[in-house]
Amino acid sequence: MYIDLVVIIVLLVVILFFFRRFSSFVYGFAIIDIFLRLLTFVKNHVPIPELQNLIAKYFPESIAAVIRAYSSGIFYEILIWGYAIMYMIFFSYIVSIFIHKRK
């Protein structure tokens, strides 16, 4: 089922539609991926079967897992490099904020 792919695409389009800045898209991309990774951590470490099943059914492990599930070959390589570049840009934004916040 394509529910995980649809959810991620809709979230990213909503972020682009409301904020319309590339930096907002990068932050939204990172927020969604970090949130999915936190849910995966909860799924793997909280011994509540109902919660584990709910998270496993409706949420992917990460954006990279969605890319891996729905693409292959050179298209996969292009998308995963785009994923890595988004995180590099996010890292540069975070470092820039950290440097400018010093007093």
Image: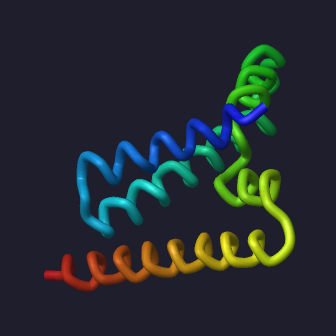
Q: Residue 89 occupies which quadrant of the picture?
A: bottom left
Measured from the top left, where is residue 49 in percent x and y? 83, 18
Measured from the top left, where is residue 55 in percent x and y? 71, 28
Measured from the top left, where is residue 95 in percent x and y? 37, 81
Measured from the top left, where is residue 83 in percent x and y? 60, 70
Q: Residue 79 occupies which quadrant of the picture?
A: bottom right
Q: Nearer the viewer, residue 96 or 68?
A: 68
Q: Report the side of 8 relative to 62 (left or right).
A: left
Which corner quadrant holds the C terminus? bottom left
Indicate the colouring scheme: rainbow
Residue under the point 32% across and 68% down = 22
Reply above or below: 71 against 84.
Answer: above
Reply above or below: 72 against 66.
Answer: below
Which corner quadrant holds the N terminus? top right
Count of numbered tags: 0
Q: Report the side of 103 relative to 66 (left or right).
A: left
Q: Report the side of 16 relative to 87 (left or right).
A: left
Q: Nearer the viewer, residue 17 or 80?
A: 17
Q: Nearer the viewer, residue 79 or 57?
A: 79
Reply above or below: 58 against 101.
Answer: above
Q: Report the side of 101 relative to 44 (left or right).
A: left
**Name of the residue lying farthest toward the left:** 103
Reply above or below: 21 against 70.
Answer: below
Residue under the point 69% across and 72% down = 80
Residue under the point 70% across and 28% down = 58
